[in-house]
Image (cartoon, rainbow, N blue to C red):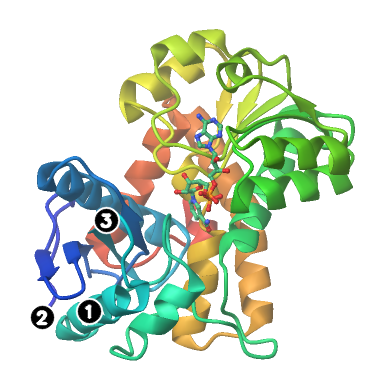
Amino acid sequence: MPHRVGREAALPEHIEMIEDPVSGLRGAIVIHSTRLGPAAGGCRLWHYSNDNALLNDALRLAEGMSYKNAMAGLPLGGGKAVLQRPAGDFDRAALFQAFGRAVQRLEGTYITAEDVGSSVADMTAASSETAYVAGLASMGDRPGGDPSPWTARGVFVAMQAAVQRRSGGSLDGATVAVQGLGSVGNALCSLLHEAGARLIVTDPRTEAVRAAEEKWSAKAVALDDILDAKADIFAPCALGGVLDGHAIARLRVKLVCGAANNQLADSGADGLRLTRRRIDYAPDFVVNAGGIINVAAEYLNWTGAEVQDRVAAIAGRLVAVLDQADAHHIPPAEMAHRLAKDAIAIGTPVDREAIHA
Ligand code: NAI
């Protein structure tokens, strides 16, 4: 039975440490909250220096999923699986099958999908052992497959809406500095280029940078220089924690809107720093929900059209959060957290119309 969670909803409902010596599986599944539905969140495969670091990441990410799912209006709670990447070569299929068995043991209180370090193929391996998995290859026009293009689409529509709200303008002719040209960053750049935006990009993978220069006439800068780029928008699409006091002081943009999870090193203090610098901040967990919307649709048997509508609605949600943040004189990240926590406390996902109430 799901526990009721309090207003702060910080403590997880359940932590499952998982281990399978045969395949090398070692990790944790954290169910932060099932108040709004089964806890949904991806499975991260990463190298951690120790179990504490792994568990801390899982706790933080699972909590973030509760807020993301609530803000996206999904009937889902928040959870996350974090696995230690074995050293050297390993049998991926065996590892993800063992993971699938661990997911199955939780009897549907946790639904998994791919995340950083895991893929559609890995989820397919897990699906031989559990029904509680999404992010499988899509069939026909049913939702499924790689969620990244949907994440990029959500960030893109949010960016359009934030620019329109601030200046009445569009992305045509705007300059966007994109940090990270992975699955989401690349798809976002493509949408921005189509919309007439100019791109400044960075990524440690030189081949990705070269491709961006060729395809979109992007201007490449060194990794650290992206923070000083003279642009209208900064789109963090690589790492978490990129915005601390030092980084925010260097920004020369009017809006931060990107896909990376947990962009603010300190969500309270750094949110306030951005507001004081009159930089609009699009809270990451509000605008990067496109992927989980697609995952939810796959699991809940929604149509492709439903995914499109819900991802398009991210734009209105962001505007509502920014408007309410202004009205309450608090930073947008704090406003979004308040809305998500309230939604979890009353047991109803955030309805966009209700944000204005
Ligand atoms: P990815 O792993 O495909 O891409 C990350 C890219 O960032 C890579 O190209 C990597 O080389 C680059 N990178 C690493 N360090 C960098 C640095 N210091 N400066 C610039 N670039 C750097 O990951 P993906 O899927 O594109 O996700 C990007 C971010 O968005 C991650 O933080 C992820 O957690 C978040 N996110 C992704 C979703 C999805 O649907 N894929 C959904 C929600 C959030």
Residue 32 vertical position relative to residue 226 in the rendered view, above or below: below
| Image position, residue 99 (x, y; %) | 24, 75
Identify which amino acid the numbered label 1 is placed on: Ala
- Looking at the picture, tell me which residue is in the foreground, 50 or 171: 50
- Looking at the picture, tell me which residue is in the foreground, 7 or 356: 7
| Image position, residue 47 (x, y; %) | 28, 47
Name the image quarter holding the N terminus. Answer: bottom left
Give the crowd class for mark 1: few <14, some 14-19, many >=20 residues within 10 Å. Answer: many
Identify which amino acid the numbered label 2 is placed on: Met
| Image position, residue 275 (x, y; %) | 49, 19
Left or right, residue 200 beside residue 17: right
Label 2 close to label 1 by CB (< 8 Å): no
Of the residues under marks 3 and 2, which one precedes in the sequence? 2
Identify which amino acid the numbered label 3 is placed on: Ala
Residue at horizontal 44 percent and vertical 34 percent from the top: 263
* Circle 1: element type: helix
Of the residues under marks 3 and 1, which one precedes in the sequence? 3
Residue at horizontal 33 percent and vertical 43 percent from the top: 338
Residue at the spot of label 2: 1
Front of the two marks 3 and 1: 1
Residue 95 vertical position relative to residue 222 in the rendered view, above or below: below
Inspect this view and state whether residue 154 appears. yes
Of the residues under marks 2 and 1, which one precedes in the sequence? 2
Residue at the spot of label 3: 62
Residue at the spot of label 1: 98
